[in-house]
Image (cartoon, helix red, strand yellow):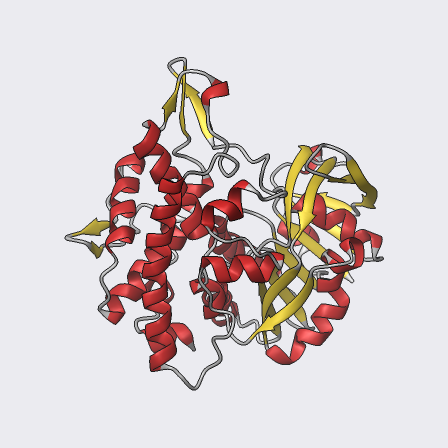
Amino acid sequence: MNITVIGGGNSAHVLIPLLSKKGHNVSILTRRPQDWSDKIHLEYVLANGEIKRETDGKLEFASSNPEEVIPNSDIIVLCMPVNKYRETLDRVAPYINKDKKVFVGTIYGQAGFNWMVDSIIKKFQLKKLNYFAIGLIPWICRTKEYGKSGITYGCKTNNLVAVYPKSEFNYLNENFLRHVCFDWFNKGEFVLSDNFISLTLSVDNQIIHPSRLYALANEEGGIWDKETEIPFFYKDYTSYSAEVLQNLDDEYTKIRENIKKQYDEKNFMYMNGYMESEHFSYNSNSHDIVDSFVNSQTLSSIKTPVVEKNNKYVINRNHRFFYDDIYYGLCIAKWFAQELHIDVPTVDKIIMWAEKELKDKILINKKMCCNIDDNKYKYGVPTVYGINSVTEAID
């Protein structure tokens, strides 16, 4: 199959070799085509630094012009920060082949991916376009050398995906999903979620990242004199960080339970809280939030996102942890909470903290204001797609 990866993020450096190994023709759409080699090396690295496995993959073509790679694509995969999905879909949609079955999907399904794709289907009359969203990135990965080599620290035991239409799951699984995980790692089979809202309202990065950053800002001021003083994002996880995360998770649970009760005819089997998702993904028996992070073999090497400023290290306010997980994470939860008349004080508190960091105004009197005059792609709340009720958002 002709597969186009869009974006040169960490996951692209894993996808390209794994897919090309299975005989697919893989191209990439990127702002930096000149930096991509036609051979991409992948290393599977254990927690102790030992290389367990390695392989090479072939990149057929790299371009910054969607007209050169999109029209021939059978599958298009987004590998980029969540806040870039909408703008990218609008950019490539005019070039998607309307005369054959094409899949467009994302390697990470946060933030109502179905709302995004439905909007381009209507706008560009893409009646044959199918789509999918993988619940969580199947593996922990990093770029070793941009455009040339990637690293994975292991994969999840179980993976979740939503597919539209659902009848295409088996086809997509045999021709794509198994190739990106199970066939190389010998684990990480995909399970079909009955709906996309279960992915959007299950919790992972959208509560993990903001709660940890908020806790670091409160516990340590979010500023350090030396690089060696900066806590690791997960390995040095604290009970206070866990408390903030749990409070967020509890508020999401109120939203989820309300939806399950109101729409009890629907299957929300995989719309889970943090510990449920963690146990499903890793088949783990971790007892609590701190344990799930501190003792994780795949997360131990991840650092806190900082920048150097005035000879000190401060939290990086321009990081995707803000733009993905506030605007396309907590803001979506806040929208659902407003529609369902549910109080979410921890969501409010962290959004108001992020407002100061971002020098932005998101809430007025604890209500969403969603000013998109300066950037129409800033928010991922349902109203930007013309969705004005919970029923519409779920369907």
Q: Residue at x 54, y 76 (%)?
A: 194
Q: Is residue 21 left or right of residue 372?
A: right
Which residue is depicted at the point 75% across and 59% down?
182
Residue toward you, 140 or 366:
140
Looking at the rendered image, the quarter that the N terminus falls into is: bottom right
The part of the image, by quadrant, that contains residue 359 is top left
Identify whether 147 is placed above or below 332: above
Q: Is residue 123 visible?
A: no
Q: What residue occupies the far left of the structure in this picture?
A: 365
Residue in the foreground of this view, choosing between 243 and 63: 243
The answer to whether residue 113 is seen in the rendering is yes
Estimate the x, y position of residue 135 in percent, counting from the top left: 55, 61
Q: How many marks?
A: 0
Q: From this viewpoint, which residue is outermost toward the top?
A: 311
261 relative to 351, above or below: below
**Is 367 positioned to the left or the right of 45 in the image?**
left
Q: Quadrant of the C terminus?
A: bottom left
Q: Residue 389 in the image: x percent, y percent?
A: 31, 74
Classify 261 as above or below 44: below
- x then y, percent, for residue 42: 77, 41
Pick the residue in front: 92 or 76. 76
- The residue located at (41%, 74%) in the rendering is 394
Asked whether, in this view, residue 200 is left or right of residue 163, the answer is left
Residue at horizontal 37%, vertical 53%? 246
- Looking at the image, the residue that sits furthest to the bottom is 265
Out of 156 and 26, give the one closest to the viewer: 156
